[in-house]
Amino acid sequence: MFSFLRQRTAPPKTTQIEVDGAPVSIAVKVSARARSFRLSLPASGPLLTLPETARWSDAEAFLHRHRHWLAARLPRAAQAQRLEAGVMLPLRGVPHLVVGTGALRGRVDLAQTADGPVLRVPGDAAHQPRRLYDWLKAQALVDLTAQSQHHAARLGVTVKQVRLRSQSSRWGSCSSTGNINYNWRLILAPPHVLDYVAAHEVAHLVEMNHSDAFWATVERTLPDMERGKAWLKAHGRELMAWQAPGGES
């Protein structure tokens, strides 16, 4: 009787459904231009787009009806990849074999062998994933801080703080206060891809949207932005498959 007084439930930023017995995280986006629900698979992962007037309960029902569509299209190559000895890890886009040294002390380091580059990780097997993860994040923070400051100088803005996250569907985010969050997995991509994401996020300090003016700002600081953008579209899901130890976010 008083249904007109009810408030629509605000949709979450992400949701999960079970696909082939495993949980799959799905980003949720509300679009003023959308006229119906849409489920898509961009490089950053599954995306559910909703019209502004949609009810979340209807969106959940739509998602449930299309779970088989999603299961058929999720790439098998993007099954969870763990940071452990024996895997080939694409550090800065170059495959490295991860090797456990067996030493209880020491740091992760790089070495060249006759069979190619390796990442040597100390510690026992139980602790190696955490040591490798911490090292990768430290490398990512150095690279992303440098490129963020580079693009900030070119655009005349100030980056207040750079932090790393383990988002399952985003490469970065930027606040109007100058704080930028990046996905640690960018250290696994070729340098020009990391540079593109840095340019993208810093450009949000000029334009907090994805308008034509925003893309012109990205191109102003990174003229070949399409190169990195195209790489992420083609290979982004492969990077998202790498898992932080312990489900860290």
Image (cartoon, rainbow, N blue to C red):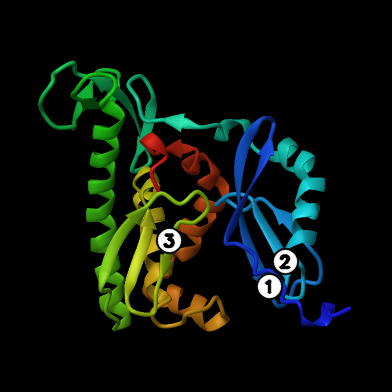
Q: Is residue 125 at all visible to an observer of this figure?
A: yes
Give x and y (percent) for residue 8.
Answer: 72, 73
3D distance between C-alphas at marks 1 and 2? 6 Å
Q: Residues within 10 Å of mark 1 (few under 14, many from 20)?
A: some
Give x and y (percent) for residue 21.
Answer: 66, 30
Q: Residues within 10 Å of mark 3 (few under 14, many from 20)?
A: many
The quarter of the displayed image where residue 36 is located: bottom right
Name the amino acid, label 2.
Leu
At x 56%, y 35%, the residue is: 78
Residue 136 - label: none
Q: Nearer the viewer, mark 2 or mark 3?
A: 2
Q: Nearer the viewer, residue 21 or 98?
A: 21
Q: How many marks?
A: 3
State which tag comes first along the sequence, 2 or 3.
Answer: 2
Name the amino acid, label 1.
Ser
At x 37%, y 72%, the residue is: 202
The quarter of the displayed image where residue 132 is located: top left
3D distance between C-alphas at marks 3 and 1? 19 Å
3D distance between C-alphas at marks 2 and 3? 21 Å
Q: Is residue 222 at all visible to an observer of this figure?
A: no
At x 65%, y 69%, the residue is: 10
State which tag comes first along the sequence, 1 or 2.
Answer: 1
Q: Which residue is mark 3?
A: 172
State which tag comes first along the sequence, 3 or 1.
Answer: 1
Placement of 112 over or under 224, stated as above or below: above
Residue 50 - label: 2
Give x and y (percent) for residue 122.
Answer: 18, 24
Question: Helix, strand, or loop for circle 1?
Answer: strand
Q: Which residue is mark 1?
A: 31
